[in-house]
């Protein structure tokens, strides 16, 4: 198939500040990009977002993975079309994420420029470097309606979110605790165990199983955990066996010595594991590690894809609790915003 006629997929109209430096990006620079395929509408002509809104309003039932695939799964021939497109221009296929409706490629800038009829530029501002297509990302007419978005070619739009996120700040105001806890540390200070929170809010699961049979996925932005520390933590909580924790994507990074920032990332991971494991100790916990920056426009959305596409662990609950407000996430372009719609509404009763 020859690709002659092109159409705009994404246009860039924002003007640059006067102190921006723009230069041509080295043609041999390798870029990893994710092509997000368009999902079909349901038999009732509903988009994924339409259906998800209906779940929240009580109109539609929640869907199993197989039911979701039947309604909104991408047709195999559309994957074939995108794969052939990549092969035609010599892009290297890295991964196909069927459930997440995505294909990951890697290619030098010169190849990407030809494939998407664009010119990728390097943009420098305040000693930070970004990339963005000169005016638009374009796709062949044959792929119109097949490709929804392309991630990885524009980091400029993420510049305000591009620096590593900070671990949330916590305040211990015991007067705000809504129920009494009998737990005290070695200095006599009161604290609340996860199982006490579960009991207080009557968390809806079978107490006899403690979450047995469930898999809870946790999205993590860098960091890692110490098995020895967790074993001691769960032992103090009164559990004879720690939860089953698996790293389903990325790396458990606990190499020493850690910088202060890295220690904060580890603290975030340890906090999440202690809370989730303390609340449902019988559940399996699957960790999905990504780069700690929203400017990584491939790794960040792909870590959600990994969770969606994980048919080995099959998480039915997904937690993403790093401290960014939805108003800040709104700065991410529409295609990426789609991920957050799906993430928050795919399992609507289990969002943290």
Image (cartoon, grey):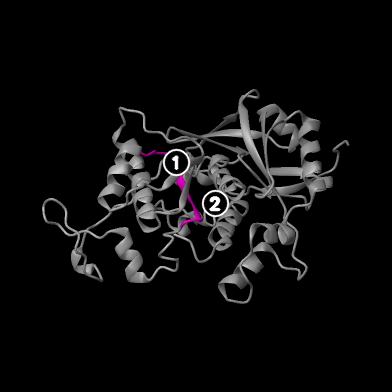
Instruction: Answer with left or right where residue 308 lies relative to residue 1.
Output: left
Q: Which mark is residue 332?
A: 2
Q: Is residue 224 magenta?
A: yes
Residue 35: percent from left, percent from top = 68, 43
Q: Does the CB distance between marks 2 and 1 fall below 8 Å?
A: no
Q: Quadrant of the C terminus?
A: bottom left
Residue at 65% from the left image edge and 49% from the top image edge: 100
Query: Residue 48 occupies which quadrant of the picture?
Result: bottom right
The reply to whether the magenta stretch includes residue 246 is no
- As drawn, 145 above or below 18: below
Circle 2 Cα neighbour tier, 10 Å, few/some/many (<14 / 14–19 / ≥20) = some
Q: Give how far across and how far down residue 289 sits, in percent.
A: 48, 41
Of all residues shown, which one is farthest toward the right? Answer: 1
Circle 1 crowding by C-alpha within 10 Å: few under 14, some 14–19, many from 20: many
Magenta stretch: give its range.
212-225
In the image, residue 189 lies at what x, y percent?
A: 14, 57
**Residue 313: where, in percent of width, then height?**
56, 47
Q: Secondary structure at mark 1?
A: loop
Q: Nearer the viewer, residue 151 or 43?
A: 43
Please give the label number shown on residue 292.
Answer: 1
Q: Nearer the viewer, mark 2 or mark 1?
A: 1
Answer with mark 2 or mark 1, whichever residue precedes in sequence.
1
Instruction: Please determine whether, in this image, residue 348 is positioned above or below residue 36.
Output: below
Residue drawn at x 69%, y 46% as measured from the top left: 98
Foreground residue among 163 and 47: 47
Residue located at (74% from left, 43% from top):
138
Q: How far is mark 2 from mark 1, CA to CA?
A: 15 Å
């Amino acid at each position: 198939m020859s690709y002659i006629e092109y159409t705009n997929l994404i246009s860039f109209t924002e003007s640059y500040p006067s102190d921006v430096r723009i230069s041509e990006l080295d043609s041999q620079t390798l870029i990893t990009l994710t092509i997000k395929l368009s999902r079909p509408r349901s038999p009732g002509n509903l988009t994924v977002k339409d259906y998800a809104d209906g779940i929240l309003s009580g109109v539609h039932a929640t869907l199993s993975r197989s039911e979701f695939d039947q309604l909104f799964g991408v047709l195999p021939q559309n994957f074939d079309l995108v794969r052939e497109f990549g092969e035609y221009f010599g892009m290297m296929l890295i991964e196909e994420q069927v459930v997440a409706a995505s294909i990951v490629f890697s290619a030098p800038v010169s190849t990407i420029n030809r494939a998407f009829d664009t010119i990728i530029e390097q943009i420098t501002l305040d000693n930070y470097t970004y990339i963005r297509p000169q005016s638009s990302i374009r796709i062949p007419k044959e792929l119109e309606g097949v490709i929804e978005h392309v991630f990885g070619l524009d980091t400029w739009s993420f510049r305000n979110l591009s620096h590593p996120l900070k671990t949330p700040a916590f305040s211990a105001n015991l007067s705000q605790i809504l129920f009494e806890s009998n737990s005290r540390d070695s200095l006599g200070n009161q604290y609340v165990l996860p199982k006490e929170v579960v009991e207080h809010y009557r968390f809806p699961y079978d107490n006899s199983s403690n979450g047995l049979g469930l898999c809870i996925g946790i999205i993590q932005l860098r960091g890692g955990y110490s098995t020895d520390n967790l074993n001691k933590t769960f032992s103090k909580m009164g559990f004879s066996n720690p939860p089953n924790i698996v790293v389903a994507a990325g790396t458990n990074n606990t190499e020493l010595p850690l910088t202060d920032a890295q220690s904060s990332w580890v603290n975030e991971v340890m906090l999440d594991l202690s809370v989730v494991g303390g609340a449902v100790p019988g559940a399996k916990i699957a960790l999905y590690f990504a780069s700690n920056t929203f400017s990584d426009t491939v790794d960040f959305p792909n870590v959600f894809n990994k969770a969606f596409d994980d048919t080995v662990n099959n998480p039915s609950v997904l937690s993403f609790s790093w401290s960014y407000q939805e108003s800040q996430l709104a700065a991410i372009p529409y295609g990426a915003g789609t991920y957050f719609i799906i993430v928050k509404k795919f399992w609507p009763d289990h969002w943290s």
